[in-house]
Image: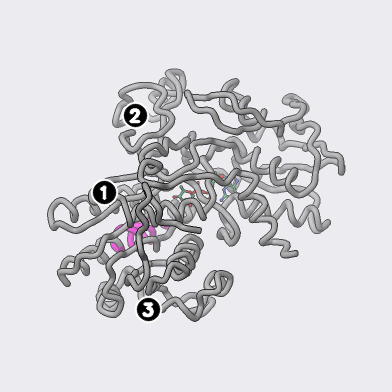
Amino acid sequence: MNLNKINGDVMDWKDKNILITGADGFVGSYLAEELIKNGANVYGLIQRGTQGIYSQNLVNHGIEDDLKIVEGDLTDITSLAGALDLSEPEYVFHLAAQSFIPASFKDPLKTQMINANGTSNLLEAIRIKDLDPKVVFAGSSDEYGLVISSEEQYETLKSKYGVVFPEPISIPELPIKESNPLRPMSPYATSKVYCEYLMRNYHDSFGLCTVVSRAFNHEGAGRGPMFVTSVVTQQVSDLKAGKVDSIRIGNVNALKDWSHVKDVVNGYIQLAANGVSGDVYNQGAMRTNSVLSYILLSLETAGYSIEKIETVTGEKVMKDPAVTNNDPVFGVKFVKTAVDSAILEEGLEYTAQDGGINVFTDKGKVAIEFDLERFRPSEVPISLCDNTKIRSIGANYSYTVKDIIGDQLDYLNPK
Ligand SMILES: C[C@H]1O[C@H](OP(=O)(O)OP(=O)(O)OC[C@H]2O[C@@H](n3cnc4c(=O)[nH]c(N)nc43)[C@H](O)[C@@H]2O)[C@@H](O)[C@@H](O)C1=O
């Protein structure tokens, strides 16, 4: 894949020195593989973990020999200074973070320590050493947080929280543009807002070249087992193998803009090559699909034909819930299921009172059980990315949700 082409110009990565923080993570290992393939000298700042210094991701991507591993820790500025000395980077991709939102609710200080202090340490080490790499930072769509989709929802939120700040300029605030207000709803998201402002401060005040990516959910083979797409595909795979007879899950109504990690990695590379320093770019596929759809489409991809879904109480019944349409919502045409359309347009919502959902398939009934422990103290209501800005510098998001699911299922069941 040529990751670097824009308007006919090709960025030559050959022999360029790159430092990736978190190079053994889910995204970092895809990025390291791609840059190594393009001839770059890639250094990976890696924290020694339970798997030792070689995480399974490096082996899966075949880069355990070519990646130049620098052992270090974001919370230890000395190790960052050492990594910068060794790698002399022209580009730094800062991906390392505590990225699991429930963990940030459990231990907010730890998330802040790793994400906020870690990012401060990295920027400060670059500044003190008077280096001039272009730094691409992994921000998050969760920085937008509380996105307003209707007047009615706005009124509900005001009565729930007392105040919604910043107040919306226009409603609906969708699709989400880079100029949307930031209303982070978790310690994780708040730490990312801090980091991205710091990126801009270091650009504006100290002249560092920093570019921020705000990526929406990105998935694929090797996604951490605690994230919902892995939780779903693992259970669907176990169901098919006869190891389980139901699916346990949290909030199925959550609407996410899911893209393939490979498209997002391409986006990071475009940002390094063509992103304007000091600027911010969304990364996402410009569609939104529910967790319930992810389950239904995973079942379909695994060979189940879906006929009907019905709540355990029998109150909510839908025939052909996984049939897709391309009708516009919030002025955007995208592929979604009938159940997504009902959530988005008719206010359909599944709650604990429904007692779970039964999925009727050609292979029998599959029970979806709600695990209330997995519901979050606060939940981002909807994510739908406006990706116009990053597409103008050469990125594109072409993988479908079914492509992503297919890769995840193949990873779990190698042929
Ligand atoms: C953009 C953003 O993307 C990711 O954050 P996330 O959206 O929290 O990702 P997730 O896969 O943990 O949850 C997705 C949705 O799924 C719901 N959900 C239901 N049932 C389960 C469940 O059983 N497990 C999980 N994890 N989620 C569940 C859950 O309530 C949520 O609405 C990170 O990469 C983050 O770093 C980042 O920046």
Q: Is residue 187 visible?
A: no
Residue 31: horizontal and vertical position, in percent? 45, 63
Residue identifier under label 1:
276
Q: Is mark 1 within 8 Å of ligand 1?
A: no
Specify the segment rendered in magenta.
107-118
- At x 76% / y 33%, what residue is drawn? 312
Q: Is residue 169 visible?
A: yes
Residue identifier under label 2:
164
Q: How is the image coloured?
A: one colour
The amino acid at mark 2 is: Val
Element class at badge 3:
strand
Q: Is residue 339 left or right of residue 165?
A: right
Q: Quadrant of the C terminus?
A: bottom right
For disc 3, the neighbor class at 10 Å (few under 14, some 14 to 19, many from 20) is many
Element class at badge 2:
loop
- At x 51% / y 62%, what residue is drawn? 26
Q: Is residue 239 left or right of residue 74?
A: right
Residue 363: horizontal and vertical position, in percent? 87, 44
The amino acid at mark 3 is: Val
The amino acid at mark 1 is: Val
Residue 229: horizontal and vertical position, in percent? 60, 50
Disc sitting over residue 22 in the figure: none
Disc sitting over residue 70 in the figure: 3
Residue 118: horizontal and vertical position, in percent? 31, 64
Picture quadrant where residue 234 is located: bottom right
116 inside magenta stretch: yes
**Cα distance in 3D space between marks 2 and 1:** 31 Å
Picture quadrant where residue 47 is located: bottom left
**Residue 64 higher or lower than 116, as above or below:** below
Spot the residue most to the front: 8
- At x 46% / y 52%, what residue is drawn? 264
Q: Earlier in the sequence, mark 3 or mark 2?
A: 3
